[in-house]
Image (cartoon, grey):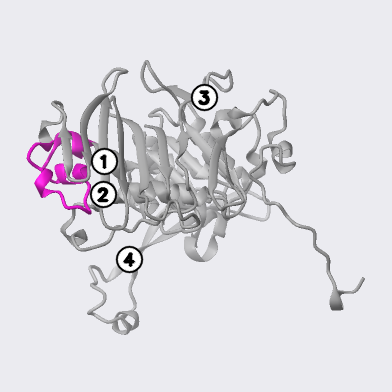
Amino acid sequence: MLIQFKVGNFLSFRDIVTFSMVASPIKEHLTTHVFKANKYFTLLKIGTIYGANASGKSNLFKAMSFMSSFVENSSKDSQAEEEIDVENFRLSTETESKPSTFEMTFIQDSIRYRYGFEVNNFKVESEWLFQAVKQAETKLFQRNGKEYEIGDNFLEGKDLESKTRNNALFLSVVAQFNGKIAISILKWFKNMRVISGLKDNYAQVSKKLLEENKSKDLFLEFIKMADLGIEDIKFEKKSIPELNLKSISKKSFIFEASEVNEIQTLHKKYDQDQQFTEYESFNMNKNESQGTLKLFSLLGPVIESLLNGHVLVIDELDSRLHPLLTNFIIKLFNSCEHNIHNAQLIFNTHDTNLLSNKVFRRDQIWFTEKDKYGASDLYSLVEYKVRNDASYEKDYLLGKYGAIPFLGEFSFGGSYGE
């Protein structure tokens, strides 16, 4: 469960900004949109981010993705001679020589952790890990350059300082040596999936769930709820044409099978009296719409998150999706029936149809906005004094919350006439 995320001096974020999933003390959607993480925290099931193009929405998710990937991979031998692929804020001479900052606070196995680090392209300058079984934090370790301070509750990290490269995270190294706490934290980062709604390459996750018959009934239930006209999904084995096999270099591709499972969707077929007669089979990739393919691609990660209580982050959720389908996914996460494990969905969008007090609490709505120096800011609607009956969409488009593009005046001239 994500509590909050901080990032600074990374891409368009010059100063440290904080994205929080902690519910504010407001009386909105209390039975659906929030949940008790423990006796100390009430968290949000969903967080959404609005803002103009190039305002920093995607950069926030890139920061989450970088942190997750670096935690998982920094200690691998393949990274030994590699520079750290981090890019600081480049529009200020003040930040050029400073490291980028990342910090995640989350709950794993009923324990609250606060973990973060500062890095540049060549080394980890600092790193820290704190835990809280109750409310007070305990230091597990703190690293400043080559100096380490190991807490009594993190004995698994003892004597591993010298085994940690300058460009590797101490936490990752400890996990590599089977440190129990470190492995648990790496597991949390691995389970936090950051995906792009502009791509459909997550269809394999959906396909795998269906092929293994895992949650197929739930998958089909969601498909039918989305009113796509699909009654069932099956797989048809197709041989890979010999011609295609010969056209691909054996050096660049290893064939593990001579046939593949092709996804078929079943739709109801009717006679002249509009009576159901049989099911007609369609090739999903050839016959279904782009919106259906997009939803199919997203449902795999969505279902995985819902079943396991994981954090799912989606950049451009509404791309190629009808607003009602986007709202459908939102309702799944806010549902007490389908989200029994308190999975969290974080996404950005331009779909202002969703900006409503019937869909979101004020603390679920966030905005990104760039200042005149090119630096992104991040803030929540709950920071504004907003009436209960206010039209969030109308006020947003009027610029009352900022985070919209400022369009200059223009006119057509030349051959376009008067």
**Marks 3 and 4, the one that precedes in the sequence:** 3
Q: Amino acid at mark 1?
A: Glu
Proximity of marks 2 and 1: CB atoms separated by less than 8 Å = yes
Image quadrant where residue 170 sits: top left
Q: Which residues are magenta?
A: 157-184
**Disc 3 to disc 2, how far (Cα)?**
41 Å
Judged left or right of residue 147, residue 113 is right
Judged left or right of residue 155, residue 117 is right
Q: Residue furthest top?
A: 39
On the image, numbered disc 1 is attached to which residue?
127
On the image, numbered disc 4 is attached to which residue?
260
Say above or below: 397 vs 381.
Answer: below
Proximity of marks 2 and 4: CB atoms separated by less than 8 Å = no
On the image, numbered disc 3 is attached to which residue?
32
Q: Look at the image and tell me in which quarter the C terminus lies.
A: bottom right
Nearer to us in this view, 303 or 219: 303
SS for dot 4: strand
SS for dot 2: strand
Residue 71 included in the magenta stretch of the image: no
